[in-house]
Image (spheres, rainbow, N blue to C red):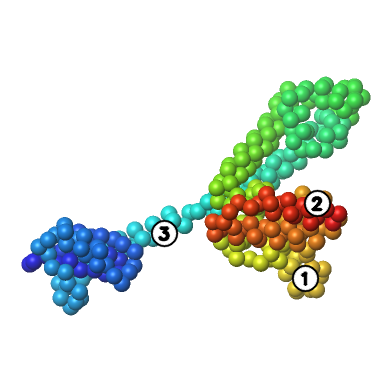
């Protein structure tokens, strides 16, 4: 039988008999003339047919497996194309938040353990990171000296060597969590410089990434009005307000922003900030210019005295 060239939704195929021998897989399209011309150059003796009734019966059966292969190829290509920087940002911020919870849990356990031996130092240093660093680098005598307490006057017991080693290992685990968090935050900032520089400049890496995570991706965030951006992260409080009539929330994750924290009228500051964040997200999503510094200056001017 003379070879034939024919097209389906998934591409163009060549057969010289009862099985497929060559194929060009492409995106679903009603027009495959370019692929047919390309296949014709490879197999000049073949004829191009468009009437499915002229396909050999066994050839039609073999198309099922080819369609499956084509579907797998297109699905894999679609999955690869769907991995964008903003999705990586979402995974990184979730990992950073998980890491922060791990650090807080370890710090709490370390304090409870260390207070058996150096309770005065634990009360003297409320900051977790400083506390962990002190346990790792100082002896019990030095810790108590920092707390202005003599070893004999301390309410803590004298630890054995094994107990000191256990305390140091817990402190090392907590310190590793801090180092991991800092490294991931640096990576997050680097990725956001590439995909959303305006949002990064105004919101910072963690707040900006959390906004993207709550929205679902940068595209959805860019489509949201500023009033929605303002409340991202306060969904539970908003639903409670809608369900029970409780007080309506004024801000979500942007509450942690330094401009909102410094303002006396935090609700008003959150509204102004959300306006700029919504514009920044649209600029980043649609390839606009970098205008974050001007917007930030304008925002700071608006918030003076607020």
Which-is-in-front pick, marks 3 and 1? 3
Which residue occupies the extreme right position in the image? 153
Instruction: Report how far apart the C-alphas of labels 1 and 2 lie in the structure.
Output: 23 Å
Which residue occupies the extreme left position in the image? 1
Residue 98 percent across, percent down from the top left: 64, 47
Q: Name the residue at 60% across, 65% down.
A: 223
SS class of the residue under badge 2?
helix
Q: Which mark, residue 78?
A: 3
Which-is-in-front pick, marks 2 and 3? 2
**Does residue 209 appear in the picture of this structure?**
no
SS class of the residue under badge 3?
helix
Q: Nearer the viewer, residue 112 or 275?
A: 275
Rendered image quadrant of residue 57: bottom left
Q: Which residue was labeled with disc 2? A: 261
Q: Quadrant of the N terminus?
A: bottom left
Asked whether the residues under the numbered discs 1 and 2 touch, taking CB atoms below 8 Å apart as contact, a structural biologist would say: no
| Position of 268 relative to 136 (above/below) | below
Q: Name the residue at 77% across, 49% down.
A: 258
Q: Earlier in the sequence, mark 1 or mark 2?
A: 1
Residue 255 percent across, percent down from the top left: 76, 55
Q: Which residue was labeled with disc 1? A: 241
Q: Nearer the viewer, residue 85 or 248?
A: 85
**Does residue 264 appear in the picture of this structure?**
yes
Q: Residues within 10 Å of mark 3 (few under 14, many from 20)?
A: few
Residue 112 percent across, percent down from the top left: 79, 38
Q: Earlier in the sequence, mark 2 or mark 3?
A: 3
Rendered image quadrant of residue 246: bottom right
Q: Name the residue at 75% across, 60% down.
A: 272
Residue 140 percent across, percent down from the top left: 80, 24
């Amino acid at each position: 039988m003379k070879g034939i060239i024919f097209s389906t939704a998934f591409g163009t195929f060549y057969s010289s008999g009862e099985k497929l021998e060559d194929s060009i897989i492409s995106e679903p399209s009603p027009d495959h003339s370019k692929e047919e011309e390309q296949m014709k150059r490879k197999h000049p003796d073949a004829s191009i047919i468009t009437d499915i009734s002229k396909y050999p019966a066994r050839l039609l059966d073999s198309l099922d497996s080819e369609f499956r292969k084509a579907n797998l190829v297109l699905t894999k290509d679609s999955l690869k194309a769907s991995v964008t920087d903003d999705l990586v940002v979402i995974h990184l911020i979730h990992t950073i938040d998980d890491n922060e919870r791990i650090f807080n849990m370890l710090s709490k356990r370390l304090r409870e353990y260390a207070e058996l031996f150096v309770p005065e130092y634990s009360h003297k240093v409320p900051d977790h990171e400083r506390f962990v660093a002190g346990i790792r680098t100082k002896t019990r005598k030095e810790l108590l000296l920092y707390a202005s307490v003599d070893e004999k006057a301390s309410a803590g017991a004298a630890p054995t060597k094994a107990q000191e080693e256990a305390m140091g290992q817990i402190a090392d685990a907590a310190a590793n969590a801090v180092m991991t968090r800092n490294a991931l935050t640096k990576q997050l900032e680097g990725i956001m410089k590439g995909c959303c520089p305006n949002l990064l400049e105004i919101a910072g890496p963690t707040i900006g990434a959390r906004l993207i995570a709550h929205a679902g991706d940068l595209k959805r965030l860019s489509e949201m009005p500023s009033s929605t951006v303002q409340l991202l992260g306060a969904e539970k409080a908003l639903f409670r307000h809608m369900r029970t009539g409780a007080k309506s929330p004024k801000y979500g994750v942007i509450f942690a922003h330094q401009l909102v924290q410094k303002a006396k009228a935090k609700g008003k500051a959150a509204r102004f900030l959300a306006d700029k964040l919504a514009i920044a997200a649209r600029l980043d999503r649609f390839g606009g210019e970098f205008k974050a510094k001007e917007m930030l200056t304008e925002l700071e001017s608006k918030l003076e005295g607020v």
